[in-house]
């Protein structure tokens, strides 16, 4: 039976961001759809389907929130780090695809990304342990 943290391995997530102003001006079409953990790249000839561990449809306001991403991914990493395991969060994507926003967040506290939330969690745990 695996010990705490050992049951985790590489997890892959994908997040679809909202259409930006430039794309709106050019009247670009959304070329992906999501259903559960499956992402479909839309094409007239041959749609392609990909399955991920986590999918976040952040195209519409209120969906695929920073909090949802932290709850799914960040909490597990935080728990494993506190238990002494090494953790890595790797963001990959095209320029302007939302990597920095997902990782660091926006100006509002509700928009905090995965990294600030994990750091906050580490210090909360430190404070809790010091009080014991």
Image (tube, grey):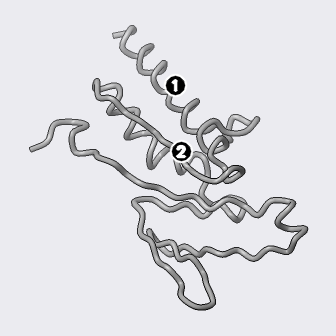
**Secondary structure beneath label 2:** loop
* Residue denoted by label 2: 91
Q: Nearer the viewer, mark 2 or mark 1?
A: 2
Label 1 sits on a secondary structure element that is helix
Q: Earlier in the sequence, mark 2 or mark 1?
A: 2
Dot 1, how many residues are within 10 Å of its Cα: few (below 14), some (14-19), or many (20+)?
Answer: few
Residue 66 percent across, percent down from the top left:
60, 47
In which quadrant will I find the C terminus? Answer: top left
Outermost residue, left side? 1
Screen quadrant of the N terminus = top left
State whether residue 18 is above or below residue 44: above
Identified at 41% across, 16% down, the residue is 128
Q: Position of residue 16 (x, y in %)?
A: 62, 62
Residue 102: numbered disc:
none
Residue 76 placement, left or right of 115: left
> Closer to the camera, 114 or 130?
114
Count of marks placed on residues: 2
The Cα–Cα distance between marks 2 and 1, rounded to whole angstroms, is 17 Å
Residue 30 or residue 125, whichever sits in front = 30
Q: Position of residue 5 (x, y in %)?
A: 25, 37
Q: Quadrant of residue 127?
A: top left
Above-or-below relation of 34 to 102 = below
The reply to whether dot 2 and dot 1 touch (C-beta < 8 Å) is no
Q: Residue furthest bottom?
A: 45
The residue located at (85%, 68%) in the rendering is 24
Residue at screen point 61% across, 74% down: 32
What residue does disc 1 label? 119
Q: How far across and how far down the image is residue 30, in percent? A: 70, 74
Left/right of residue 22 with respect to residue 10 in the rendered view: right
Residue 100 relative to residue 89: left or right: right
């Amino acid at each position: 039976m695996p010990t705490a943290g050992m049951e985790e391995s590489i997890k892959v997530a994908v997040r679809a961001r909202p259409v930006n102003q430039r794309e709106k001006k050019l009247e670009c079409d959304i070329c992906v759809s999501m259903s559960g953990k499956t992402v479909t790249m839309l094409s007239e000839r041959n749609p392609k389907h990909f399955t991920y561990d986590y999918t976040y449809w952040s195209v519409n306001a209120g969906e695929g929130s920073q909090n949802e991403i932290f709850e799914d991914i960040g909490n597990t990493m935080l728990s494993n780090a506190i238990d002494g395991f090494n953790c890595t969060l790797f963001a990959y994507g095209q320029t302007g695809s939302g990597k920095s926003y997902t990782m660091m967040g926006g100006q509002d506290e509700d928009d905090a990304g995965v990294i600030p939330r994990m750091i906050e969690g580490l210090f909360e745990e430190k404070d809790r342990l010091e009080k014991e």
